[in-house]
Amino acid sequence: MRWEDDVQVGSWIRERLDPDLGSDMHSVVPRGFEAYARIFHPAWVRSVPGGVVPTHDELRAMSEDEEAGILSGLRDEQATWADTAAAFGTVLHPLAQWNRIVRTPEGEDWRHRRAPDGREFQAPIEGDLPPALLAPVAEHLVTHTTTPDDGFAGVWEGWGGLLGSFGSTGRTFLTFTDDPGEAHAAMLAESIHDPFNNPYQKAVWQDGILSGEISEGARLELPQRNHVLFAAPPRTFADPDWVAFVPWSDKIAEGRGFPPSALHPSLIWPADRAWILVSEIDFDSTVVGGSPALIAALCADERLEALPIPEGANLQWDADEVNI
């Protein structure tokens, strides 16, 4: 697996995208596949035993003992879109939109909604299918290509910390310690590098997750997004531990004691172009285009929450005409 500087291997995608931001998904998802599936990213649900999850304002109004009792019983779990729809009395369908699944009144927060049964549902993460769910998707993908060990992955260039750049400060990490003196020293060390305290400091190269060569290298330029391209066998992503060994794994954070992590690719496709997986950074679901057999297999897998969608599907926030 390596950085791919010959970005023309992805030019076929650009040729099959709509050049302008339209009402359907094809500003980011290539046209021309026989079938498409929408894989819904998981949501989260918070509950308390036998009660209603309080809002932040309600918590602040409680006594310390009341607040401690509530917080000790809080439970966070993954939730499917179907679970969420059942809680709000709405309908999960191929073009469902989260804001309408959770019955969000105009102008209110759709990311955190309290259901009639008292549980609080949190919106799915956009642009990111958890590794534990990408793995079963990839299991199907590798059986529907003649090149399971030859393919590509595109990582959106705009993620913070991915690329190195010239500047006066680099990435910072919160330091957790019980020693006040150690915490103060860490804060002081950061302040010394504060550009506002050092207005004459010259810009120097600050490392990102990727090397300087890759950071300043060629991009796969698409109508709405530019990507850093890697030669990446599709079989790679069938292993949930791929985050630890892909070239864009965050070794800087890992060296600071954080668990292995890597940004989710926005694009994955095999060398034979039999399918494409698109996890657009503003989508709360991942779209796969491929053969009818592949789409049927994805939608039948009980580990996934996936539904078939037609070419030209509209996935914008106001596309849900069922849950109005």
Image (tube, rainbow, N blue to C red):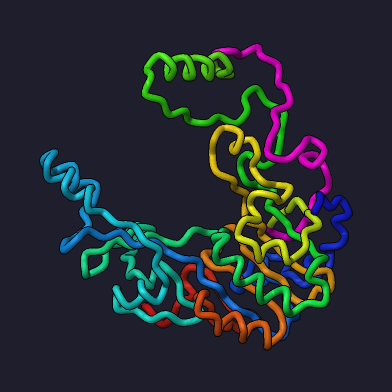
Q: Could you say which quadrant of the image residue 100 lies in? A: bottom left
| Residue 81: in magenta span | no
In the rendered image, which quarter contains the N terminus? bottom right
Image: magenta residue range: 197-224
What residue do we see at 78% from left, 67% from top?
13
Q: Is residue 282 visible?
A: no
What residue do we see at 48% from left, 30% from top?
174
Left or right side of 114 for 246: right
Residue 253 rendering spot, x and y as whole percentages: 59, 37
Q: Which one is nearer the viewer's eye here, 271 or 217? A: 271
Residue 127 rendering spot, x and y as whole percentages: 57, 59
Left or right side of 108 for 195: right
Q: Is residue 7 visible?
A: yes
Q: Could you say which quadrant of the image residue 271 lies in? A: bottom right
Residue 154 rendering spot, x and y as whole percentages: 73, 57
Magenta stretch: dominant SS?
loop
